[in-house]
Amino acid sequence: MAQSSGAELALLLLGGFHSMVDEVNAELAKRGHAGVRPVHEFALRAVDAGADTASELGRRLSVTKQAAAQTIAALEEFGYVDREPDPSDARRKRVRVTPRGHELMAIGGALFDDVRSRWATRIGPAQLETLEAHLAQLTEHRSFTADDLQD
């Protein structure tokens, strides 16, 4: 087997990411969640963990406050978050995940688990675990941001 170039490896890794995401997004669309992008679920998880303002979400996602506000607006349009008045500051609105947003996170997580299981069946559970361990080692010093999840 000929050795791949660095560029070929990068394309394989990117292809693996898109393969998983495309499968999950197609199934999410069938289940009433069309138009979802990886950054949406990433943002939902951050909001659910306490990033309830555009400023805080921006810090968590390592994006500008404006980019975070755009993501919040998209999530609100999809019905995944809503805004409620801040009891301590009437000028501020707090973002919270709606039941529909929690549903998306649960379904999305289960769908990624399904893809992982199919991959384990195709290449073997031990090989997939080895691949995951190697990727974790290679990316241990890399922090990921919302920009990494854009399509």
Image: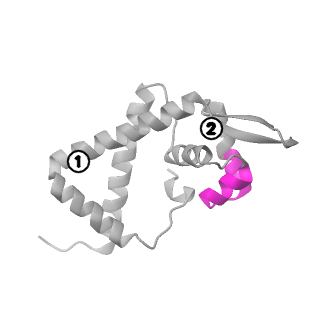
Q: Which residues are magenta?
A: 54-70
Question: Which residue is painted at 41% across and 26% down in the image?
Answer: 30
Front residue of this view, candidates 150 and 140: 140
Q: Give amino acid for label 1.
A: Trp
Residue ID for mark 1 = 119
Q: Give amino acid for label 2.
A: Leu
Q: Position of residue 113 (x, y in %)?
A: 32, 42
* CA distance separating discs 1 and 2: 30 Å
Question: Which residue is painted at 58% across and 49% down in the image?
Answer: 46
Q: Is residue 102 left or right of residue 67?
A: left
Q: Position of residue 87 (x, y in %)?
A: 82, 38
Q: Main secondary structure of the magenta part?
A: helix
Tag of residue 75: 2
User: Residue 96 sits in which quadrant?
Assistant: top right
Tag of residue 18: none
Colour approach in the figure = one colour
